[in-house]
Amino acid sequence: MTPEDLAELAHLRRARDLIDRAYAQPLDVPTMAAKALMSPAHFSRRFRATYGETPYGYLMTRRIERAMALLRGGSTVTDACIAVGATSLGSFSTAFTAITGETPSAYRAREHRAVDAMPGCVAKTTTKPAHRPVSPSRASSRIREAGGTGAA
């Protein structure tokens, strides 16, 4: 790695740390990019290349991860939504379902005794949300429903 690559990585890490710290605050790509001392477009490309997901995707994953912990602790879906900085209950529920594969209400209603018995560091790793891939057939049907052709 060149010194320039290391410097860029340090800037990207600063932006990622901002997301980790201020996930509940209103954050947008220009704000994150400013922290990384990059233009928004360049920042988005480099962040995705480095961390495997877009800055907004990373932010939403952090928010959903925190919401999962709140829901396991007994918070209502609305309280969890507000606590993690989501702007609407509908978009929060949609994002939660897309990332975890189940609705926030279903997640809250499920038993979590095994997670409660784990050490915090293990629970955090075990319960980390992962984006669920959309199958090609589901993606095509979504495109057709939106008025597209389904062909790339």
Image (spheres, helix red, strand yellow):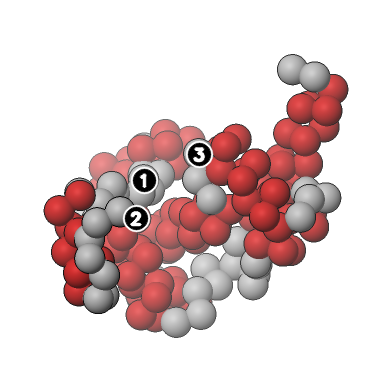
**Residue on which the image places disc 1:** 130
Say whether marks 3 and 2 touch (CB < 8 Å): no
Q: Residue 104 location, x and y as percent?
A: 29, 67
For disc 2, the marked residue is: 99
Where is residue 139 drawn, in percent x and y? 23, 57
Q: Which residue sits furthest top?
A: 1
**Residue 14: image location, x then y, percent:** 75, 45
Residue annotated with mark 3: 52
Give the amino acid at mark 3. Answer: Gly
Amino acid beneath label 1: Ala
The quarter of the picture where residue 125 lies is top left
Q: Earlier in the sequence, mark 3 or mark 1?
A: 3
Of the 4 image quadrants, the one containing the C terminus is: bottom left
Does residue 58 appear left or right of residue 43 in this picture? Answer: left
Q: Nearer the viewer, residue 6 or 112?
A: 6
Give amino acid for label 2: Ile
Residue name at image x 64 percent, y 72 percent: 26
Image quadrant occupied by the N terminus:
top right
Q: Residues within 10 Å of mark 3 (few under 14, many from 20)?
A: few
Residue at 76% across, 55% down: 39
Q: Earlier in the sequence, mark 3 or mark 2?
A: 3
Of callouts 1 and 2, which one flags the residue occurring earlier in the amino acid sequence?
2
Secondary structure under the numbered disc 1 in the rendered image: loop
Q: Estimate the x, y position of residue 91 in percent, counting from the top left.
A: 39, 75
Q: How many marks?
A: 3
> Could you give the CA–CA distance between mark 1 and mark 2, rounded to whole angstroms?
6 Å
Label 1 with label 2: CB-CB less than 8 Å: yes
